[in-house]
């Protein structure tokens, strides 16, 4: 469905600023009927990749093929087979819900009774039939996001691209959005989304973790977290360097971040009493928990997910 090989992108020099490499030889593929998240902090290359996949910008090097069509050589054919939902709303707020959808249908060659019937079915499915004639500006953020999804899938694409889909949504609206995405998956639509939210990434079938333009890991969220052991101890201290030297008597490694030491171990609950007994006067706080995706990111990159 999607195949990316050795993808590189350089932002050109602009206003005296030097050229910047945003993507560094990216490789990965996408299978049918899965929800895949591109997870990474701001500036990691997610949005650049999204722009390339949606044919807004061309790769500097490498290839991207969607359904066998090259995004550089056959962008029009690629656009016919994908749905795109941008982070910023693309709805015309002065038009009604129905008018927005009619114009979207026209862009993809849909018209007449067939288009009206499809819009009617989709509005019913998204529980928006009663708001069809309301202007978009009168709707809540959650409703507007539902319309964005409906608009992006009106032409029945096999691949839906979403950039930071839950940006600006409250918890209830995020939950509703994910229920719709799971339903789309059941109907045979593959979803590729970018996100910087850990809790959103946990909902994906598969993740591709980005950092500074490179892929640092990929796989199911549960499998990714398994790599760093069963527990993570986080120790807050006023002098982390000194405490790190003292902790060398224990059989584990650590990561030093600001005023905290993060320890990956399979026996965290057993080590905490020993650590407190020997070095309690040096410790402000100490916690232990199951590893998270952020713990894995720190393990791979040495810095927090920010």
Image: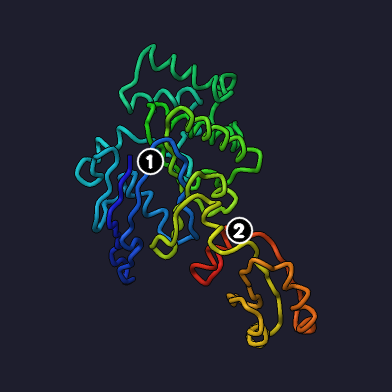
Marked residue nearer the N-terminal end (2 or 1): 1
Q: Secondary structure at mark 1?
A: loop
Assess whether mark 1 and mark 2 are in contact (beta carbons under 8 angstroms): no
Q: Nearer the viewer, residue 179 or 219?
A: 219
Relative height, residue 158 to residue 63 (above, below): above
Apparent side of residue 59 relative to residue 158 in the rendered image (left or right): left
Q: Whole-percent x and y of residue 175?
A: 62, 38
Q: Whole-percent x and y of residue 297?
A: 52, 63
Q: Residues within 10 Å of mark 2 (few under 14, many from 20)?
A: many
Residue 31 image label: 1
Q: Nearer the viewer, residue 295 or 246?
A: 246
Relative height, residue 95 to residue 66 (above, below): above
Q: Which residue is found at the position 61% from the left and 69% from the top?
A: 264
Q: Quadrant of the N terminus?
A: top left
Apparent side of residue 215 relative to residue 12 in the rendered image (left or right): right
Q: For the residues marked 2 and 1, what is the alpha-carbon distance in whole angstroms? A: 25 Å
Q: Secondary structure at mark 2?
A: loop
Apparent side of residue 216 relative to residue 70 in the rendered image (left or right): right
Q: Nearer the viewer, residue 290 or 173?
A: 290
Q: Which residue is mark 2?
A: 292
Q: Which residue is found at the position 49% from the left and 67% from the top?
A: 300
Q: Which residue is found at the position 38% from the left and 49% from the top?
A: 50
Tell me, yes or no, if residue 189 can be seen here.
yes
């Amino acid at each position: 469905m999607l195949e990316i090989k050795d993808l590189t992108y350089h932002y050109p020099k602009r206003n005296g600023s030097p050229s910047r490499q945003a993507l560094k030889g990216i490789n990965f593929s996408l299978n049918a009927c899965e929800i895949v998240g591109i997870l990474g902090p701001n500036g990691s290359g997610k949005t650049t990749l999204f722009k390339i996949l949606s044919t807004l910008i061309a790769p500097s090097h490498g290839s991207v093929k969607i359904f066998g069509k090259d995004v550089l050589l056959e962008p029009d054919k690629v656009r016919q087979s994908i749905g795109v939902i941008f982070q910023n709303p693309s709805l015309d707020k002065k038009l009604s819900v129905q008018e927005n959808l009619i114009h979207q249908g026209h862009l993809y060659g849909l018209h007449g009774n067939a288009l009206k019937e499809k819009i009617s079915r989709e509005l019913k499915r998204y529980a928006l039939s009663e708001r069809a004639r309301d202007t978009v500006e009168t709707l809540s953020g959650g409703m507007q996001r539902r319309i964005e999804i409906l608009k992006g899938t009106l032409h029945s694409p096999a691949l839906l691209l979403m950039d930071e889909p839950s940006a600006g949504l409250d918890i209830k609206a995020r939950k509703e959005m994910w229920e719709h995405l799971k339903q789309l998956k059941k109907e045979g639509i593959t979803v590729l989304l970018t996100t910087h939210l850990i809790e959103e990434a946990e909902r994906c079938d598969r993740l591709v973790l980005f950092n500074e333009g490179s892929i640092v890991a990929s796989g199911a969220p549960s499998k990714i977290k398994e790599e760093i052991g069963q527990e993570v101890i986080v120790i807050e201290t006023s002098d982390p360097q000194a405490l790190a030297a003292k902790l060398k008597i224990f059989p584990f490694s650590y990561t030093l971040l600001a005023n905290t030491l993060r320890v990956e171990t399979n026996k965290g609950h057993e080590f905490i009493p020993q650590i407190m007994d020997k070095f309690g006067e040096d410790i402000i706080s100490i916690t232990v928990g199951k590893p998270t995706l952020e713990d894995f990111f720190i393990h791979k990159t040495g810095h927090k997910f920010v």
